Amino acid sequence: MLFLLERDAGQIDRAGAQRMLSQKMAKESLLVQQGLMPVTTLQATVQRFDQVHRQLLQGDAATGQPAVSKPQALAHLQAVDRLWQSYRPAVLALAGGELGRLGQVSSESEALLSEMHAAVTLMAAENNRLAAIQRWVSLLATLSILLLVVLSRVCGMSWLMKQIDELRHRLEDVSRGDFSRSLQARYPDNEMGQITLAYNQLLEQVGSMIRAVRLAADEAGQQSAEMGKAAARSASDVQGQQAEIDQVATAMNEMLATSQLSMRYSQSVVWRHK
């Protein structure tokens, strides 16, 4: 759209220059006829008008300017082309001293000016129409971009809050001692994905540490149970040995008592025989 506006602006500039040149040639032809201006100046103006006129009708490959394509403006330029075929020799003839061409130059100059003005007006109207379209397109594009920005923000915030809410629930589970549930990193290349990966890594490390502590506790429990069993066996053995010692002591006491009875009996027998 901008390219079309720049192209049409160049065409309007050329057409506007044509209006000025058509009147300039009439003035210069009179000045040349009166000897106040060299004829080369008029010839340069005629050549310039003819060159610009051809560029409007056929385009200019050197500058990249296309020919006028709007049918109404093109019709007026074609009318200018027909007038130019008679106006050009009339201007040169008037400059050469043929004062009889003055009326023709005057009437055709007005006709050229009228046709060129109509062409410029139509071209300017078309350019304004394209500019209005461009403004509407720009406005719609701006509104669309704003809408996309708002929708992206709403959707992005919804997605972000959902991810944060899920992370909050997982942290609450961790606070209750549940380390079994990890998070799924759907997009690991963004900030939330990196936070999720860090949370999963922390969960794995803490879980490994807790499993190691539990394993050590289980092993300590087993060892304590085995030590308890060994202590119980030792106590049982000690009790058995104590019972045997008690039995031996009882037997020894009984033997001592028997010996004492025997000694007293022997002594009593001896005393009787005396």
Image: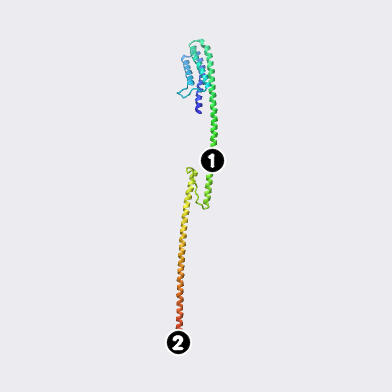
The residue most toward the bottom is 274
Is residue 162 among what the camera can see?
A: yes
Q: Amino acid at mark 1?
A: Cys
Image spot of residue 88 (x, y percent):
49, 14
Q: Nearer the viewer, residue 72 or 24?
A: 72
Which quarter of the image is occupied by the C terminus? bottom left
Numbered marks: total: 2
Kind of residue at badge 2: Val
Q: Which labelled disc corresponds to residue 269?
A: 2
Q: What residue appears at the point 45 percent right and 87 percent down from the top-left corner? A: 269
Q: Earlier in the sequence, mark 1 or mark 2?
A: 1
Q: Is residue 35 visible?
A: no
* Residue name at image x 55 percent, y 32 percent: 140
Disc 1 versus disc 2: distance between alpha carbons? 124 Å
Q: Which residue is the site of mark 1?
A: 155
Furthest residue toward front: 71
Residue 261 position in % (x across, y down) = 46, 82
Q: Residue at x 54, y 16 (%)?
A: 111
Does 12 sit above or below residue 140? above
Q: Residue 100: x percent and y percent? A: 51, 10
Q: Is residue 219 above or below residue 182?
A: below
Above or below, comparing residue 244 to residue 35 in the picture: below
Q: Secondary structure at mark 2?
A: helix
User: Local crowd at mark 1 within 10 Å, few (<14), some, or many (≥20)?
Assistant: few
Local secondary structure at mark 1: helix
